[in-house]
Image: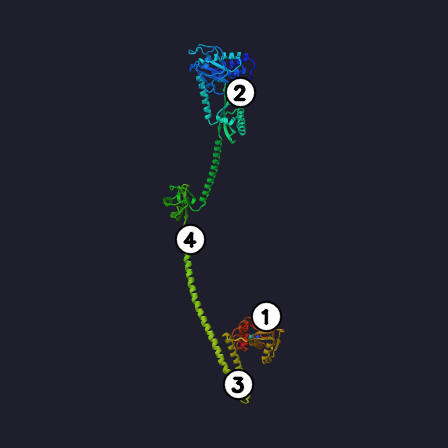
Amino acid sequence: MSSLQARTFTRPIGTAVNHAARLELLENYLSYQEDILRCAQMSLEWLARHAGVKQSACLAVDAESSMLVGIAAYGVVGDDIELFSWPLSDAYDPLVGALQAERPVQFRSYRPNGHAAQASPSPLGRGPFTAIPLGLRTSGVAEHEDLAPGLLLLRAPAITDDIQWLVTVLGQKIDQVRGRGSLAEEARKLRRERTLFFTIINAVTDPIMLTDIDGRLIVANARAEKLFAASEEESEGRRRAVELNNMLFSAALSRSAVEGTPEARELLLVDPSDGSDLLFEVLSTSVEDPREGTGVVSVLRNITDLRRATEQIEENYQKLRVAEAAVRAERDRLNLIIDSVADPIIVTDATGATVLMNAPAEDLFTVVPGASEAASRTVQANDAHFSSFISGLLLGETGPGEIRRGEIGLMNPATAEPIPVEAIAGKVLTETGELTAVVTILHDRREALERARLYEQLKAASDELQARVQAATAELATQNELLRRQAIELEQASRLKSQFLANMSHEFRTPLNAILGYTHMLLQGVAGDLLPGVKRQLQRIDSNGRHLMTIINEILDITRIEAGKMPMQLSEFNLNELVPEVMTELDPVITRSKLTVVPRLWLDLPPVYSDRQKVKQIIVNLLSNALKFTHEGGIQITVGYNEAERTAGVAVADTGIGISPENHEKIFEDFRQVDDSPSRQYGGTGLGLAICRRLATALGGRITLESTMGVGSTFTLTIPLETEQ
Ligand code: ADP
């Protein structure tokens, strides 16, 4: 409103009264303006400019209400001029009195007649002021014939020509208009309309503005004032925001003027109260007013929330699209999976109707065009079986995620071959627990049944085998037991045999010793000289008796060793000494053989701790054999020592007949001879080497053999330096 006044009243103030100024007032307002209030207002302003009257007010007689009412004021503060009214009936009121005066009435200190309701006694207060009755007295108003049409109250040093001129023309104008209606009524109507107008535009929550073509604010509702108007007292920030909003708005208006776009455009403003962004849609319409010129009415619609909601909706729509795509992909994937499963899969809805099935299921439950009658019947039968399974499931109480199994007897429509299937079904429930679908997988049980049959067969075979193994094991145990008993019996028999042999040898030796003893005495001539023939026969008895004694001794040795009754006589001795001793003992045999026997002793040989008698017996035996089986050449008896092994030994090497490799082990067995024919060339029992090996083992040693047929043999006895008891 302020800008409206500023625009309207910026005409230069004239310094001299002139006709041009009077003409302007008459032409612009008083001649054609029907609005008496506006005429009065313009007149007072004209007085201020041309007559220097800084304070003035105009009162007019309202014939209808018989009141003197205020219609315009200039330069006065306080109550609205339209609130001043005086009843004309109050003839004692000074102002009503002034209406009847012939000339201006001076009020030094004005006092109303006590009836005035207003706070201020008059528009110019208590005065001093001058009240000039307007214009001419007319006879237009019957009851108040003597009254002027109104009063001009002013504060001025003198009543100039201009004032008098104005009093005349304004009086004429009021008189002229007064004939047409009630002044007070018009003022009230205008007041009501103005109040209504502001009530209406303030009730609109959208900012509404009337601006001039330069964008200056003329009228604004409360919402718009919040955005575009700020007084000096308001905060700096708020004022700056308002300034910015004005700038943005002017720019938007001029843009729409340039582009000539009548449609709505968006405008981003700042909320002066909190600085937040506000998005508006501006609808501008230009209006033409004969007096005010061209203006622009703009209605701003706040679309901040709308924009936000739009964005939200857009975002949600995008999300929906993405979700939809995901669901579609999921469904395609699911279809792919269902189709790639070899087992029939059927999806039914809550009523049991089939919604989806894969190719293997279609083979069972759909009739192929051109199928035989039998095939169609089979499909129907399959359908019936499956439906009864599903209805059983739908009636039954199965929770979400729970799987129900059942067996259904179906048939292959193409081959009429029975297919026993296991149906595995699960319910698909919504979040609220409502049943949406049932997914059933039919698993062909033929293979499983075949496997079960094979398994049974295999199990039976395995059981049989196990029974057989058990029987065989029992048999084996019996045999083992028998063998064990036989072994015990054999062992007993062997012990008895050894015992018997030992006893018998002893029994043989006693009489044989007597025979040999007596023979020896006869040969020594104890019973007198003997004839040469008798002596020869006695010598044969002696020789055979000795041979028999050797055999008996050897058998006795074997049985003793067998029975573990060969006592050890351990002592320390030197092998170097033992070899010549053996040679001395066998000297007659060596001499008779005409072979050279060479002893090869070991210098610094440590003494051995062993059974001297048994070692000697072994060496005697080996040397006897060498002499027996060698016809030419010689025999070497070598003493040896192995420091690392802590063993000593004696090797008897001959140049005799040799022993074939297959007999190298055999000759150590009891009674074993290489030539065991009845016509054999060499004597002996075959026990010598068997006894030697047993003795060597008993001493902790061994006998080894190296021999080549026709070249010779070497028997080696090895014993530890110390034999343990
Ligand atoms: P015998 O009392 O028969 O000699 P031995 O046990 O001493 O019994 O010998 C067994 C057999 O080993 C002999 O009959 C002989 O065939 C063979 N034998 C033993 N020593 C020699 C040897 N030095 N050369 C060849 N053959 C031998």
Asked if disc 1 and disc 2 are in contact, CB closer than 8 Å, the reply is no
Name the amino acid, label 1: Arg
- The quadrant of the rendering that contains the C terminus is bottom right
Query: In 3D space, how far apart are the residues under numbered discs 2 and 3 (Cα atoms)?
Result: 188 Å
Query: In 3D space, how far apart are the residues under numbered discs 1 and 2 (Cα atoms)?
Result: 144 Å
Would you say 126 lies left or right of 414 here? right
Residue annotated with mark 4: 451
Asked if disc 4 and disc 3 are in contact, CB closer than 8 Å, the reply is no
Q: Quadrant of ligand 1?
A: bottom right
Q: Which mark is drawn over residue 519?
A: 3
- Residue 606 in picture, x, y percent from top left: 61, 73
Q: Which mark is drawn over residue 7?
A: 2
- Residue 200 in picture, x, y percent from top left: 45, 24
- Say which element carries label 1: loop
Q: Residue at x 53, y 19 (%)?
A: 9
Disc 3 C-beta below 8 A from ligand 1 = no
Would residue 35 be seen by someone viewing this image from the given angle? no
Q: Residue at x 46, y 74 (%)?
A: 493
- Against 5, residue 437 (above or below) is below
Residue annotated with mark 1: 646
Would you say 414 lies left or right of 220 here? left
Disc 1 or disc 2, which is closer to the eye?
2
